[in-house]
Image: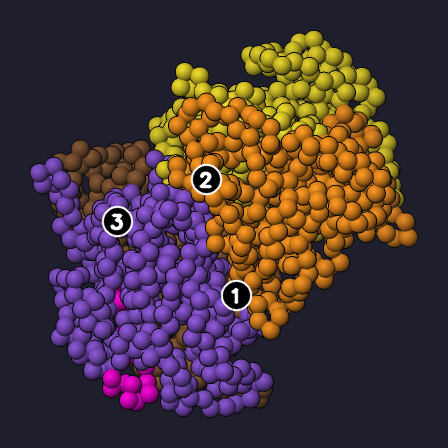
Chain colours: A orange, B yellow, C brown, D purple
Amino acid sequence: MAGNTFGTLYRLTTFGESHGEAIGGIIDGCPPGLLIDEMYIQQQLNRRRPGQSALVTPRDEKDKLIFLSGVFEGKSTGVPISFMIRNENQQPKDYDHLKDVFRPSHADYTYQQKYGHRDYRGSGRASARETIARVVGGAIATLWLKKYGITINAYVSQIGSVKLNLHNIDFNLIDSNEVRCPDNNTALQMMEEIKKNQQQGDTLGGIISCVIDGVPAGLGEPVFDKLQADLGKAMLSINAVKGFEYGSGFAGAAQKGSTQNDAMEIKNGKLFFLSNNSGGIQGGISNGAPIYFNVAFKPISSIKQKQNSITKQFTNTEISVSGRHDVCVVPRAVPIVEAMSAMVIMDFMLRQNAVK
Amino acid sequence: MAGNTFGTLYRLTTFGESHGEAIGGIIDGCPPGLLIDEMYIQQQLNRRRPGQSALVTPRDEKDKLIFLSGVFEGKSTGVPISFMIRNENQQPKDYDHLKDVFRPSHADYTYQQKYGHRDYRGSGRASARETIARVVGGAIATLWLKKYGITINAYVSQIGSVKLNLHNIDFNLIDSNEVRCPDNNTALQMMEEIKKNQQQGDTLGGIISCVIDGVPAGLGEPVFDKLQADLGKAMLSINAVKGFEYGSGFAGAAQKGSTQNDAMEIKNGKLFFLSNNSGGIQGGISNGAPIYFNVAFKPISSIKQKQNSITKQFTNTEISVSGRHDVCVVPRAVPIVEAMSAMVIMDFMLRQNAVK
Amino acid sequence: MAGNTFGTLYRLTTFGESHGEAIGGIIDGCPPGLLIDEMYIQQQLNRRRPGQSALVTPRDEKDKLIFLSGVFEGKSTGVPISFMIRNENQQPKDYDHLKDVFRPSHADYTYQQKYGHRDYRGSGRASARETIARVVGGAIATLWLKKYGITINAYVSQIGSVKLNLHNIDFNLIDSNEVRCPDNNTALQMMEEIKKNQQQGDTLGGIISCVIDGVPAGLGEPVFDKLQADLGKAMLSINAVKGFEYGSGFAGAAQKGSTQNDAMEIKNGKLFFLSNNSGGIQGGISNGAPIYFNVAFKPISSIKQKQNSITKQFTNTEISVSGRHDVCVVPRAVPIVEAMSAMVIMDFMLRQNAVK
Amino acid sequence: MAGNTFGTLYRLTTFGESHGEAIGGIIDGCPPGLLIDEMYIQQQLNRRRPGQSALVTPRDEKDKLIFLSGVFEGKSTGVPISFMIRNENQQPKDYDHLKDVFRPSHADYTYQQKYGHRDYRGSGRASARETIARVVGGAIATLWLKKYGITINAYVSQIGSVKLNLHNIDFNLIDSNEVRCPDNNTALQMMEEIKKNQQQGDTLGGIISCVIDGVPAGLGEPVFDKLQADLGKAMLSINAVKGFEYGSGFAGAAQKGSTQNDAMEIKNGKLFFLSNNSGGIQGGISNGAPIYFNVAFKPISSIKQKQNSITKQFTNTEISVSGRHDVCVVPRAVPIVEAMSAMVIMDFMLRQNAVK
């Protein structure tokens, strides 16, 4: 079973290769009557877009969103919403030299082994350009979640070895700098780190943290479709992601139960959790506290430095990947993490509605 | 959509509460003609079972496996394999005091909020006793995978603050001690740590590492059903899991592309990866190298120490959870991690078969 | 992908062979808090059961329902409801002679071709005894639908060449005779027909008609999951069914638009359809009028007369199927048609709830 | 769960309204390396297209197929194949008068009830123009099936009261006349019938018969996803279809077991069925004999005669539907029946491959 559909009730099916005609998707299951704020959606696409600063790739893809169905008089009609973004800045010849060489740690070799016949231009389907469709699906989910007071904010908390050390995050600062780190001092250090690596022809990874506020208690479908399980799958399906942890995460493994447990208290008839090591999820179901998690990204594989690799014909070769590539894609992945989160939360809202 | 089915082509649907009649499941999609080695499956159940040593809970559940369908003359017939394990050692009165109190960081509160009506006896459906059905599903998958030379080995690499520092793991040592750590010195320290916490009425978490050998290149279904995405979901659906990372994982976020990338080389016509930071997966598809990952478990929530909590009637109370509980369940979770891994790999093998 | 799960939000997964340990299933997605009236469910099982009269098979299977999970204090808890019915009256030796012979128009040959390894005892998985699990799933759905004023009544409208000619059906009469035909004169003729064929060692098919009242407008999910499409699939999945038609059905193919169309009228502010050729469904969505359809059953294949057939070894042979078989199973299939209908309607109710 | 995806392993998700930007879809699960013969696919679209003769609607939609992804160097790559057909001949003003009136037996009323907000132009999503996407999905499946020697032929066997009486069908004659009836005399009568009704401002239904040759034994997934169940669902999801029967069908209900059963015989080591009342399917699984079935279409609802109806504001009104409508769409539905059949058979081939 091919795996290009995400979600159970709010379902996004995507298509498109980096240098094909278009990238796009079909959203099936969007409730009717939702105001489709195209400007907001385009804005999210722009946040993902390269060419926003000197720090990212100089490609200017524009990524103009076109709806093909499902929106009438500015509102969703309940039938499939189809959309596409044309690949306007295609320069397929840039990639001719990659036809017969597998770039290390790219998907070149594995796609060849799996499919035999592959579109090698600009990584084809394995290109992160595919995430455009996720951003659209997530932006529409976000519009719907806003009606229920649910908000999602992701930000960069680590680039290379530079880590954010801050407990009270001001989400308004996230987009105030090019690396989307809500602390300007740390952001400056991160930008330094990026520049340094750019000169060395090297690349950097990092960590994105995400906070979801306003989720009511009761979302999640144990025992397999636990809320954290679907969030984890969503994140691990994003290009370059190597890890996911929520609440106390990996650090929680070294804690004791007496420290880890989130005591509960009633004040003025209202429930308070005295801590939130659970990350807003207990037994796979949201408990009403903020949901938060971290997503680890490896450095992208396209480096200018020379590496050992092999050809399609199984001979040894050397390769240095030139072309218009980012040093660090983590800041651009912030809207993608938000988009995937929005789709997961909306999906579980609809799933819970069904049996209420 | 309720979430008690796992997998797409090899599908396990489970049922059962801790103190109901039975725990069990239905496997739909097992190929016909597979020898169902009941002794092997029972052995995996025994590995999961409490009461194996002084370090774990004294409950002796026996967990005798009964097949109800799908096996004829010792072999699978291709139709649903149904099985159950009776809950023989039920002492529901043990749990009467929990009817109206929510234990901190348990699923008590969230189940109540989600379902309204819940079986509170011994955590009901939220009990880790549910994982019995996963072990059966995974053991049958393992039998099938063996035919293709695929083997799965999980082991404990951290309990509390005690970490395993070992690069060449001898899988034969895993079951040689009670904590399932393949280094006897580290194992002794872990057991010390557990005893210490037992005396303090506290509990411990830890990390399980898992290695899958023999997976052919080509498994995984981008862009959403990437191999790591489904492995991650599988692990995050296990009780008490807080994080998942594969290959270089979270540490990879601080690496540079030049270090992270796995160079390739042909020797004697055969492909070698000079490192395996990819953890055997590139672009969401297996590359033929060993797959490995870590799973973080929080300490279990049932501690004997007194904690602040609330009642179903939203009044404050104090609770100390007595009863037969483990100090650290991580060693018992080793066969569960293996079982979930086996089901994921088998599912992707079948998915790949379909279009070959 | 194996096909033993039915439904999308209200999901029944079934297991069991005619002469295995048990027949049963898991219902995933039943809303919590539903009163599980076991007596009502058992009653539906009894309606399906053979041995209710001289006209049907003398086997007395009892079919005692046992719940294994999901029901607590008499109500559903929202987690999987598992149930089984033991196969008590197994006489597998009755079937030894069928090990190597394929009975004409049975599933013997096709199961052998598909699975290679099969349980040949009493048709194994292909036995209509499998429908026990459907009746349980449907009875629980019916209990839920009653809360919304939805009722389902099926009856026998044809056996062999004897057809029911009646426009105003009194549903109370359905179970007043052994053939479940709501007209006692026609019922007597049907019973005559059955007796005659019994003497000849032959079997009979027939037609079941079904009426669903009280369905609100708005159920159905075009373009593929139209209400009639899922009802049709549900019926065509029942053993021996050869056709499905709803509303004007096959006769509608010979009508003209001017006759076929259901004119609409408002009287006292309420909508009335002046006819119901649509069978309560337009554009794949319920319109609030009664839903009705017909289901054609072929005569069962187990006849006492001698027939040409072949062995597993591909040699010619003759066979006459002895044993305890019905002459006409159509009356016993009435509760099965109702059960499948109930599951479809409940599923679409939940699907519509999700996005409301 | 919205219902715009068809199939389990070969999956088509469709989008588009009659007067929106485009109609199209995404095929997920097409095996890589398949030659995508665009001319053949366009030819199937042309067969579905109106304006082919005086007997059908004068609209000339052209329906030029555009691929957006998944095809590289003329072959499928294994990733999603996306395609669209622009709606070039939109005259939405034609439909302004339908904004507030529900046409009898159309989907106007039910869409309004279900979604609240609907695209009323030219029936919107409920328009049969949606079937364009099915024809593309089916044509690609047909190209794949040809490699395995499987062929599908549908033809018109009834229009209004004119029935085809022919046992040996020459499939080459199907497209030799405008009504796609493989007997020219009957075709002439059918065309007469159509002309007569055109003058009366009335419409006609009919029956399409379909034969699938070359299907190997073993396809179908009991107990719910029986081959006939999925074929039935596929057909009943097509606009205007009211019934489905396979093999002996409704007539089989009046037969006896001794007549109905298909005796088997070995000649020269090869299996022959002495009759084919089973329609090539036994126990839900193909037996290797030709599969055949009938599909009943009601006359389309758009008639020029005046009818009673109601407005969106629930007042009474009269309506006569003018515009460019067919008298009888049955001939144009022939490629749609073939397309849906092809997708079902291919899906079951892949499902069977998975476990082989």
In this view, D180 is above or below C346: below
For marks 3 and 2, give the one nearer the viewer. Answer: 2
- The amino acid type found where label 2 is placed reads Asp
Q: Nearer the viewer, mark 2 or mark 1?
A: 2
Residue for badge 1? A69
* Residue D200 on the magenta span: yes
Q: Quadrant of the N terminus of chain C?
A: top left
Query: Is B204 placed left or right of B237 in the picture?
Result: right
Q: Is the residue marked by circle 1 packed among few (<14), some (14-19), or many (20+) residues within 10 Å?
A: many
Q: What chain does badge 2 belong to?
A: A
Above or below, A13 relative to A35: above
C161 shown above or below B319: below
Q: In front here: B123 or A340?
A: A340
Residue range corresponding to the magenta coloring: D195-209
Reply above or below: D1 against B269.
below
Question: Residue C203: image x %, image y %?
Answer: 23, 55
- Gap between marks 2 and 1, in whole Å? 36 Å
Residue topped by disc 3: D146
At 59% from the left and 52% from the top, the residue drawn is A61
Name the amino acid type tagged 3. Answer: Lys
Q: Which residue is mark 2?
A: A96
Q: Is residue C15 left or right of residue C296?
A: right
Q: Secondary structure at mark 2?
A: helix
